[in-house]
Image: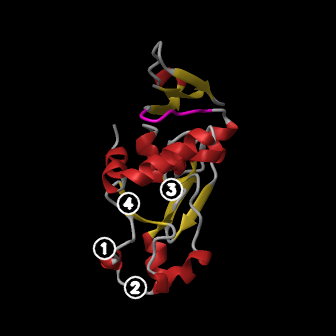
């Protein structure tokens, strides 16, 4: 299983359960809901004009790291004197950084990076402080894809996908598909 699952469990068991409950209540996959209650730290630090590692010293501010690269701060846990900034921060609900998304979908990140890729236009993108995010939630909803917790997802050309009796297969356009194990 990917490293993100382990990190979320470690950093805050309570938050992990909240995300899980929301996922079940909304009948939406767990994967695209990971960042629903987080801000990108890079954006927070630039808008506040604070040094990069200062979040480590904020006692009640919860954080999460994805791919050992992206740091996220849980919404509504900033110190009181910095709460004013939350209204101007970018909502990342349903979005994932393209590197993390490609790792979780077991696909090369080029699919999210180059317009020549056949599925590039099937996704919605957002840039936040030079970090490119892909809207996985919208993609999953539009294609009727449900990914239960602890599942493995594979996106690719149909001929390259490994199908199993216990997997769910979703056909996309141009000979692409998604398999959920």
In front: 51, or 57?
57
- Quadrant containing the C terminus in the rendered view: top left
Q: Is residue 24 left or right of residue 45?
A: right
Residue that numbered label 2 is attached to: 50
Read off the residue under disc 4. 64
Residue at 45% from the left image edge and 15% from the top image edge: 164
Crowd class of label 1 (few under 14; some 14 to 19; many from 20; radius 10 Å): few
Q: Tell me where residue 2 sits by quadrant.
A: top left
Q: Which mark is residue 35?
A: 3
The image shows residue 17, relative to residue 91, as above or below, that is above
- Which residues make up the magenta segment? 145-150
Marks 2 and 4, how far apart in space? 18 Å
Distance, label 4 to label 3, CA atoms, is 10 Å
Q: Circle 4 — which element?
A: strand
Give the main secondary structure of the magenta stretch.
loop
- According to the picture, the residue beneath numbered tag 1 turns out to be 56
Separation of residues labelled 4 and 1 (CA atoms): 11 Å
Q: Which residue shows up at 32% across the image and 46% down it?
A: 6
Between disc 2 and disc 4, whose residue precedes?
2
77 with respect to 92 (left or right): left
């Amino acid at each position: 299983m990917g490293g993100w699952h382990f990190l979320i469990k470690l950093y805050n068991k309570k938050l992990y359960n909240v995300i899980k409950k929301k996922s079940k209540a909304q009948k939406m996959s767990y994967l695209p809901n990971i960042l629903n209650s987080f801000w990108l730290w890079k954006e927070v630090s630039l808008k506040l004009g604070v040094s990069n590692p200062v979040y480590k010293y904020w006692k009640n501010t919860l954080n999460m790291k994805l791919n050992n690269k992206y740091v996220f701060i849980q919404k509504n846990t900033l110190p009181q004197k910095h709460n004013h900034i939350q209204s101007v921060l970018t909502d990342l609900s349903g979005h994932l950084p393209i590197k993390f998304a490609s790792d979780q979908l077991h696909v090369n990140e080029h699919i999210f990076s180059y317009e020549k890729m056949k599925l590039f236009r099937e996704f919605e993108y957002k840039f936040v402080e030079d970090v490119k995010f892909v809207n996985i939630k919208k993609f999953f909803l539009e294609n009727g894809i449900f990914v239960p917790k602890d599942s493995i997802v594979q996106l690719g050309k149909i001929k390259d996908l490994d199908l199993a009796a216990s997997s769910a297969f979703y056909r996309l356009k141009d000979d692409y598909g998604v398999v959920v194990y």
